[in-house]
Amino acid sequence: MAGNRQTRDARSAMALTTIEGAFDRLRQDESSPAWLNPLRETAFDVVRRKGFPRTRDEDWKYTNLVGFAERSADYLQNRPTGDTVDAIDSLLEDLPSIENACRIVFVNGLYRADLSSGAEPDSGIELTPFSRADSSAGEKLFQGQPVDCNTLIALNTSFLTDGLSIEVADGQKPAMPIHVVFASDGQPVATQPRLSISIGRGSEALVVQHHVSTGECLTNAVTGIDCAEQGRLFFIRLQDESAQSMHVSNQIVRIAADGRFDSVSIDFGSLLARNDLEVDMHGEQARINLHGLFMSNGNRHVDNHLRIDHRMPHTTSLENYRGILNDAARGVFNGKIIVHPGADGTDARMNNRNLLLSEQAEVDTKPELEIYTDDVKCAHGSTTGQLNPDSMFYLRARGIPETVARTMLIDAFAREIINRVRSKIPALADYLCDRVSSQLPDET
């Protein structure tokens, strides 16, 4: 065991050395926006000092990033291009058509105006690709954004090529959904998508962050979200990259007084997927609802880590994540709720339910509560098992074939999360149901 660990550490160290060489070459690239350079230097110091997370780190106990580090070292040697190829056209054609939505498209991490449709005039929405921002605007876009909270966020900042800022002005409630698509066409490049969302005071917005790809792509995504007082955001994150891809993401969210954040996070793709979501509730009466669904098969691996900080009185949080795993797939769920001193009246609930469709599938689940004050209502729970035999018997007794009965039960298990989307975007919910069906083996 110790030998294997030393080998993994040595491989990560070698990958980091190669990445440092790629960063040195990036320093000499005069086409890089000047306003990004100081941020990059600060961020890469963190990458160099901390290195990639290791399985000896508690938060990474079940997820090995050595392969991700080595692919990063290889792919960061190459510069991405956003040229359209047949693969991208096919990926975009398969996306759901969201009524009245504006669609912003990035290809291999680069903004593509010709594939995008902006917001309506006077909608109260300002959409700014980072590559279109001058120095003063660029620096403003990054104010309050996560830069170097951990190695992966720092790596994103160090090699950032483009991104999108979404700003909703105070008091605006645009009906137009914002569909942000990050597509990769299989080029051997490491994309570092960055999305910044700012919801003004008393404003509302609906944002879909959608990752699709073909081939052995590598994605290291960072999303920063700030909801001002009485701001409301319904946020959907859909990761549907190829089964050969590697995908890690960090979402850092801040919710002010009486703000509300509703999130639906769905993972269908990737050989390796790791999602970190941190929500800081720093205002009284802040509320969040976090719903998630992850499906995996083959030898694929998906890991969801959530952390919620209740810092002020009378804040409310709900977490409801579900996993469906088949073959030799492995899933991880870690949800941590921290109720800080003075956060009296906190109401926090967490639930993780997992469905295993084979004897080889595995889920590691760890719900956590840390409470440092009185007068709170907190609960957490987790279940992992196979399809309910009583439910199967009920359906079979009514003449429903076994394969159909199994599909009905799996579909119902997933729809409880997908239905959170249906009230907002019915077409997207239909698309997600079709994707669930396509993930199921023929014999179910």
Image: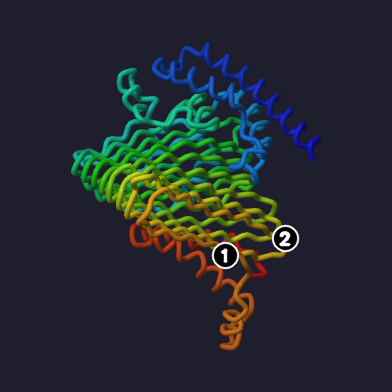
Query: If the image is split into quadrants, where does the N terminus sit?
Result: top right
Q: Is residue 119 left or right of residue 305?
A: left
Comparing 38 with 104, the one in front is 38
The answer to whether marks 1 and 2 mark residues whose Cβ atoms lie closer than 8 Å is no
Which element carries disc 2, helix, strand or loop?
Answer: loop
In the rendered image, the vertical position of residue 20 relative to residue 423, given as above or below: above
Q: Amino acid at mark 2?
A: Gln
Q: Which residue is mark 1?
A: 383
The residue shown at (60%, 79%) is: 392
Mark 1 and mark 2 lie on one chain; the one further toward the N terminus is 2
Would residue 264 be found to the left or right of residue 140 on screen? right
User: What residue lies at 45% left-to-right and 66% top-to-bottom?
Assistant: 416
The Cα atoms of the two marked residues, 1 and 2, are separated by 17 Å
Q: Quadrant of the C terminus?
A: bottom right
In the rendered image, residue 150, in percent from the top left (x then y), is placed at 52, 32
In the rendered view, would you say 66 is above or below 172?
above
Where is residue 15 shown, x and y percent of the image? 67, 26
Query: In the rendering, at what x and y percent does residue 172 appear?
Result: 20, 44
Depth check, front residue: 269 or 265: 265
Q: Nearer the viewer, residue 282 or 244?
A: 282
What amino acid type is highlighted by mark number 1?
Thr
Q: Would you identify the image quadrant in which residue 295 lies?
A: bottom right
Disc 2: which residue: 360
> What number is the disc on residue 108?
none
